[in-house]
Image (spheres, rainbow, N blue to C red):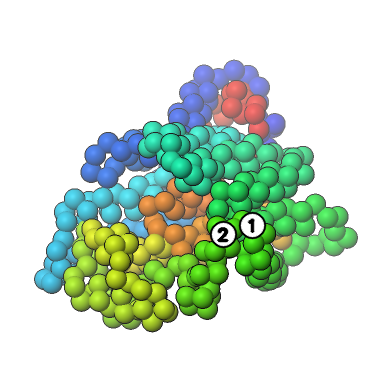
Amino acid sequence: MLMRAAALPTAPTSGGTVIRLVAAVAVALVGSRIFVGGGATIGNAVALLLLPLWLPVWSRYRGGRVFAITGLVAAAAGLWLSDFSSADHSVSPAGALSDIVMLLGAIAAVGVLLWSRDLLPVWLIGTLYGGGMLTTSVLAGELTQANAWKFGLGFPLTVIVLSLLSRPGLRRFEAVALLAFAAAAVATDSRYRFATLMIAAVLIIWELVPSSRSRRVSTLTMLGAVSIIVVLTYNLATTLLIDGYLGEQAQTRTISQIELSGSLIAGGRPELAASVALFQDHPWGFGVGVSPNLHDVLVAKTGMAGIGYQPNNGYVENYLFGRGFELHSVAGDLWASFGLPGLAFVIVCVVLTLHSIGRQLGERAATGLVLVLGISTLWNALFSPIYGSLSTLVLTIGLGALAKDMGRHEDAWGGPTTVASLPRGSRSGSMSPFTKLQ
């Protein structure tokens, strides 16, 4: 049964408070990336311990079972492909274990977030998760880098601030925050982040405009409108970059990348050409822990050379193919490690993300957080490596999944929560300090 947090009874109950504290700690830990060995993190260990609590939750969310089952099939396929590829490729057992743990850990982390939505307000979940991301950046020393905002500080703080502003009545502050973060992205030479934040800001401002239409706009119609906004924003941003309005360094990089291949995206992401070439040559993928052989490297370099990129450099030979397949996209990385099932898993994530964004925008209920996470996940699917994209993907699916049993669509980012998974005594008990925050 769904109900507003304010409708929960008010008699004190220690059981409800304890389980909410457990949920809060679990969210923060799965949002962090503190390794304990074998590619596993503390968050993975916590998610495993909480397995009996979050495992039944999948069936309550649209696409939940499909997401989990597709991920498990991909993991099995990765192991089989690894054994198959061992005939002509070297395989690292440690790398294979790390790949499997990474995928299964992401599935488990989403399960923890779905379970926590029964216990905590969504804005608090986002804040705790963002805090875990920020802790990881600090422990990894990312804040001491030359561009700390771009490479370590900016995105976690964006998640935290937008989570705090996702509560009702703060929509105007969301727009201001998005524009401020977009300005910071320009100042720190983060072109993709600038575009993401500007698209989100435009959509939030659109939601603020009073509408005379009472019926909900369909998901497909809304996604079509968003696509037009994305194209217009891309063209505007490209013009601003070329004309130097977003900084001299960004202007120089943009012009050189367009001259390289005729397209800002193709010139800025030559790894995509390598991925396409490898897929055409070896469509079933390679497997977990598998390292490319000479033939694979030559195929990838040929694909990159086809768009005008000069692939004989240390980046290609040492980073992309030095210790495995690092194809600089979630789709490419998961396909290389888990084959076609890995690619299917990415497609499921993309469909769930599009459905969440379109449904909430159609009801003018999307927050800045859902938009930034959703757009980032869609971009990462093609243009960002899996390691740096995983935290965003987990939070996008974990908070954006829509419950099946909502009589009408409620804002999954700040609306009703269920108390079905609370201890029996706490259902007739009270609001904990966490529940009052809703």
Is 206 displayed left or right of 120 in the figure? right
Give me the disc on residue 250.
2
Q: Are marks 1 and 2 in contact (CB under 8 Å)?
A: yes
Q: Residue at x 76, y 62 (%)?
A: 216
Give me the disc on residue 246.
1
Element under label 2? helix
Element under label 1? loop
Give me the disc on residue 317.
none
Q: Residue at x 74, y 41 (%)?
A: 173
Which residue type carries mark 2? Ala
Percent coordinates x, y for residue 128 in the rendering: 52, 34
Residue closer to the observer: 75 or 62? 75
What is the CA distance from the residue labelled 1 to the residue labelled 2? 7 Å
- Where the N terminus falls, by quadrant? top right
Q: Is residue 350 above or below residue 56?
A: below
Residue closer to the observer: 248 or 176? 248
Is 433 displayed left or right of 269 in the figure? right
Which residue type carries mark 1? Leu
Q: Is residue 120 above or below residue 93?
A: above
